[in-house]
Image (cartoon, rainbow, N blue to C red):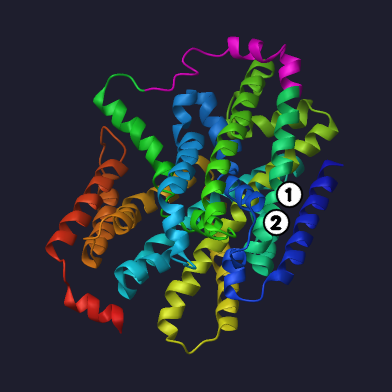
Amino acid sequence: MLLASILVYLLLTVLIGYWASRKVRTSGDFMLAGRSLPLFLSSSALFATWFGSETVFGASSEFLKGGLYAVIEDPFGAALCLVLFGLFFARKLYNMNLLTLGDFFKVRYGKRIELVAGVFIVPSYVGYIAAQLVAMGLILNVVTGMAVWQGVVASAIVVTFYTYIGGMWAISITDFVQSVIIIGGLLVLAIILSNKAGGVATVLNNVQPNTFRFLPHASGTEIITWIAAWSVLGLGSIPSQDVFQRVMSSNSVNTAVRSCFIAAGLYLTIAMLPLFISLCVRHLYPEFTQGDTQLALPSMVLAHASMPVQILFFGSLLSAIMSTTSSAILAPAAIFSENFVKPLARHRLTDKHFLAITRLAVLGFATVATVMGCLRSNIYELVGESSILSLVSLFAPMVLGLYWKHASAMGALLAMVTGIITWLIAKQFELPWPELVPALVVSMLSMIAGSLIWKDNKNLETDDKS
């Protein structure tokens, strides 16, 4: 019954994607849904940006190990990203009428920097997509007993198919349906477990010491580490194509801004449910919190929940993960088509060609991520690494490019290269704080120094106008 329900749900998702594909006529429709999403679709799409495996599996697992202090990165950092994007980036970027984030680097710094930025944007998504596929593989492993890698492959086929045919239109419409299922499924499970445990107060009064510690101790190293945790998604996902494409798909600039704030509030609220559910599991069935805590929630539901609750829970899990995976697959494909192929094609290809190329890129990136998902299994680490790549290479050029008139192409290039090199070198040493800290500092300083030293680089300017 449970397996049949999951198969029916997957089939319905594919059918919705197929229906949405009828709206796709141009590459703009495929990448940004024709910039026509109303507030409720735009908000639900943004809410679904990260509400996937890292929130339900990864964050709940880390929460059981280290309490709130261990999940600053997600959900708190993720909500911070949406708030900051709404306050400082959505209006400016929307009014620039861009198709991809790579287009911003082209307009602000020139064609050469557009290509370099694309090189740094695209790889960050492979690990992120892999994390979502691993989560779906874990679900199918728990439900059917199939090997995780087989579940990864099966999940990749379904999500890639409806993303391939419907693009951002399919993603946005399925996101709305999936958001309703996510909220409903998690609420029902939280209420049932809370009642079984004797109420919310009983669960909260029986937690382990320091479970709700949120602030760092008065130590310089710990404070830096705490700020770094906020920054991974809070700052690292600002220069990301998936956030960009969801915001820019809105039907107006006001919708774009408002949807950021609505999604942030919704995300932070709903993301508390998996954390509370994990506390209920520890209180009622502590045996499930032993071993791989990523499997604590699904294993408990299978063992102790009724069939309707199982269907709701696994339906909400699949909804959360599929909505996140689909846009993550589309993001690098859009960058590849718009910012790699189009500049090299030099007007020799039509929009239909670019639509076909984007769809083929969807298949390519999904394939690479599927292979990675079969080789690695820690969801929280895969997601964190993907955001750090964007943070240490693209954050400084994007922020200063928007808000500092003296930002130059050479400064942007130095910031990207030195940031990523510093991060790779720092990973080889045992530092008292996360590697992203020195990498981000170096990237910022390189951006400023490079822009001040190379204000008028004639070679780059000539190349940009050619």
What residue is disc 2 on? 173
Residue at which label 1 appears? 177
Residue 83 in picture, x, y percent from top left: 47, 42
Label 1: state its secondary structure.
Answer: helix
Quarter of the C terminus within the rendering: bottom left
Residue at screen point 38% across, 48% down:
388
What residue range appears in magenta? 192-215
Whether residue 292 is visible here, answered yes or no, is: no
Q: Report the amino acid beneath label 2.
A: Ile
State yes or no: residue 264 in magenta: no
Q: Nearer the viewer, residue 424 or 332?
A: 332
333 or 131: nearer the viewer: 333
- Answer yes or no: do the residues labelled 2 and 1 have beta carbons within 8 Å? yes
In this rendering, would 141 be left or right of 104? right
Q: Is residue 360 above or below residue 237?
A: below
Q: Toward which corner of the image does residue 300 lie, by quadrant?
A: top right
- Tell whether 15 sits left or right of 361: right
Looking at the image, the residue that sits furthest to the left is 453
Q: Is residue 381 left or right of residue 267?
A: left
Residue under the point 31% across and 38% down: 434
Q: Is residue 314 left or right of residue 228?
A: right
Q: Secondary structure at mark 2?
A: helix
Which one is in front, 286 or 76? 76
